[in-house]
Image: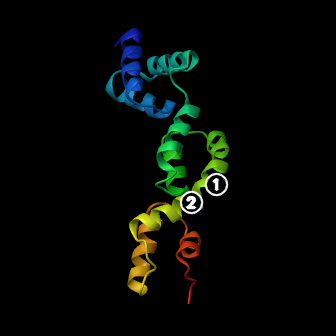
Amino acid sequence: MSLPELKHKALRLLARREYSRVELGARLVRDEGQPDEVDAVLSELEAEGWLSDSRYVEQILNARLGRYGREHVLHELRSKGIGEDLVRSAMPRIMDAQIDALKSIWQRKFGKMPENRKELAQQVRFLQGRGFSLDEILGVIGHTED
């Protein structure tokens, strides 16, 4: 595939949603091109402002912070190839939203205190699956370890 065709394919993908550089590069290599050609196209797209890891981080934070906890969001960013410097710069925003998101999710899903250990375990498992720590969960639910 020629460089203009590869760039056109990349722009079509970026028109649908944001991609990280690593994610888009893997997709283009898998579908169409040689790694050297793909890297050249990605560099060109970054220089033109079409591809931006910082914009991708913003999009992920906007989409995930109200629905998932810190660990889930961090795992997603790292798995998409976002560098540690961008992850560190996003941490204050993630931490600010953490407890509010936990309270909101718990209220929407359960809305009442667990009546027994089985319900407590169910609520804790659900919230841990969303990326919240046990200490945060127990703080919100209002239980401490026996």
Circles 1 and 2, Cβ within 8 Å, touching? The answer is yes
Category of crowding for the residue at label 1, using alpha-carbon neighbours closer than 10 angstroms: few (below 14), some (14–19), many (at least 20): few
Left of 89 or right of it: where is 23?
Answer: left
Instruction: Please identify the residue farthest to the bottom as the structure is shown.
Output: 146
Q: Is residue 75 above or below residue 121?
A: above
Q: Is residue 7 above or below residue 57?
A: above
Query: Tag 2's secondary structure?
Result: helix
Residue at 46 percent of width and 79 percent of height: 113
Q: How is the image coloured?
A: rainbow
Q: Which residue is mark 1?
A: 96
Query: Tag 1's secondary structure?
Result: helix
Residue at 59 percent of width and 73 percent of height: 135
Q: Which residue is mark 2?
A: 100
In the picture, which quadrant includes the C terminus? Answer: bottom right
In the picture, which quadrant includes the N terminus? Answer: top left
Q: Position of residue 89 (x, y in %)?
A: 67, 43
Mark 2 residue type: Asp
Q: Position of residue 67 (x, y in %)?
A: 46, 54
Q: Position of residue 53 (x, y in %)?
A: 55, 32
Residue at 58 percent of width and 58 percent of height: 98
Q: Nearer the viewer, residue 132 or 80?
A: 132
Mark 1 residue type: Asp
Q: Is residue 30 above or below residue 64?
A: above
